[in-house]
Image (cartoon, helix red, strand yellow):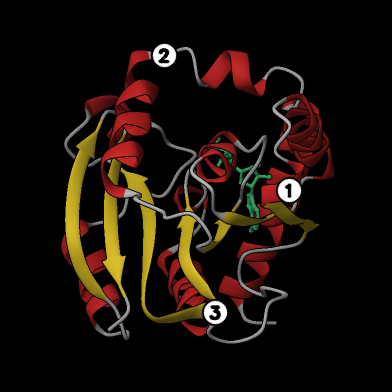
């Protein structure tokens, strides 16, 4: 195994345990912060799913964004490697009576999506890429391109290099924006919008 592959496998393993252990507190700890609200605002501004759209939330976790898309009438798929986070999501889907809009929630990893080619109108991946080196982000984007329909949209985020707290967190990858965008442009994706959102920097992408 290449050194990078080994490093990525180790990060996945560490994060799986981390989120399994923190699933009970995640919503209270993370989503009660004004920087997190900026992220939520950015999501609402850019992710305009329509009723009947087929959408996927990668690293869906407890499903904060998946539930929003289900409420907008989309047919939702969610994937995450932490079964405990997904237990919370399943509970919320029932609580919000969103079962008919949530097609499937799967345990799995972002670089190997269990969906056929070209079926999705939207893919979002929020709060995950920051744990991984650029090589992994590229592998995930290639999978996103594969499952998106032509003219499909994608919404992702990375740590905000304009935010001092985000820059100083030493357990995440603080991507160089120029390098990150060069990687995106080398793929079959166009950058439709960029947004400063608290700790995170958000991208709306389009598959021509
Ligand atoms: C910060 S949480 C974000 C959850 C949700 N997207 C949100 O914004 O509330 C990170 C999530 O990424 C998941 N995750 C980490 N690495 C992953 C990978 N390689 N594939 C799939 N899920 C992953 C974790 O299990 C966790 O649920």
Residue 17 in the image: above or below residue 112? above
Please name which of the two marks, 3 or 1, marks the residue nearer to the observer: 1
The C terminus appears in which quarter of the rendering? bottom left
Q: Which of the 4 image quadrants contains residue 109?
A: bottom right
Tell me if I can see residue 130 in this picture: yes
Q: Secondary structure at mark 2?
A: loop
Q: Secondary structure at mark 3?
A: helix
Please name which of the two marks, 3 or 2, marks the residue nearer to the observer: 3
The N terminus appears in which quarter of the rendering? bottom right
CA distance for labels 3 and 1: 22 Å
Q: Position of residue 165 (x, y in %)?
A: 30, 25
Q: Position of residue 25 (x, y in %)?
A: 70, 17
Callout 3: CB less than 8 Å from ligand 1: no
Q: Are dots 3 and 1 in contact, CB under 8 Å?
A: no
Q: Position of residue 19 (x, y in %)?
A: 72, 36
Q: Which residue is mark 1?
A: 100
Near-viewer residue (158 or 73)? 73
CA distance for labels 3 and 2: 33 Å
Near-viewer residue (130 or 8)? 130
* Mark 3 crowd level (few <14, some 14–19, many ≥20, 10 Å Cα): many
Residue 134 in the image: above or below residue 28? below
**Which sits earlier in the primary sequence, circle 3 or circle 1?**
1
Tell me if I can see residue 168 in this picture: no
């Amino acid at each position: 195994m290449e050194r990078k592959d080994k490093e990525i496998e180790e990060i996945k393993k560490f994060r799986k345990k981390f989120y399994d252990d923190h699933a009970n507190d995640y919503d209270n700890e993370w989503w009660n912060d004004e920087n997190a609200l900026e992220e939520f605002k950015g999501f609402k501004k850019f992710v305009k799913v329509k009723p009947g759209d087929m959408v996927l939330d990668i690293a869906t976790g407890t499903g904060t964004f998946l539930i929003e898309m289900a409420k907008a009438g989309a047919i939702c798929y969610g994937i995450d490697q932490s079964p405990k986070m997904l237990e919370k999501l399943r509970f919320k889907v029932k609580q919000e009576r969103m079962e008919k809009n949530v097609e499937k929630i799967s345990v799995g990893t972002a670089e190997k999506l269990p969906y056929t080619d070209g079926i999705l109108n939207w893919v979002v991946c929020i709060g995950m890429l920051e744990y991984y080196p650029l090589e992994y982000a590229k592998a995930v984007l290639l999978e996103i391109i594969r499952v998106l329909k032509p003219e499909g949209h994608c919404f992702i985020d990375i740590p905000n290099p304009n935010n001092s707290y985000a820059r100083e967190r030493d357990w995440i990858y603080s991507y160089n924006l120029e390098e990150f965008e060069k990687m995106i442009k080398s793929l079959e994706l166009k950058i439709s919008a960029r947004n400063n959102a608290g700790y995170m920097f958000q991208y709306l992408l389009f598959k021509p």
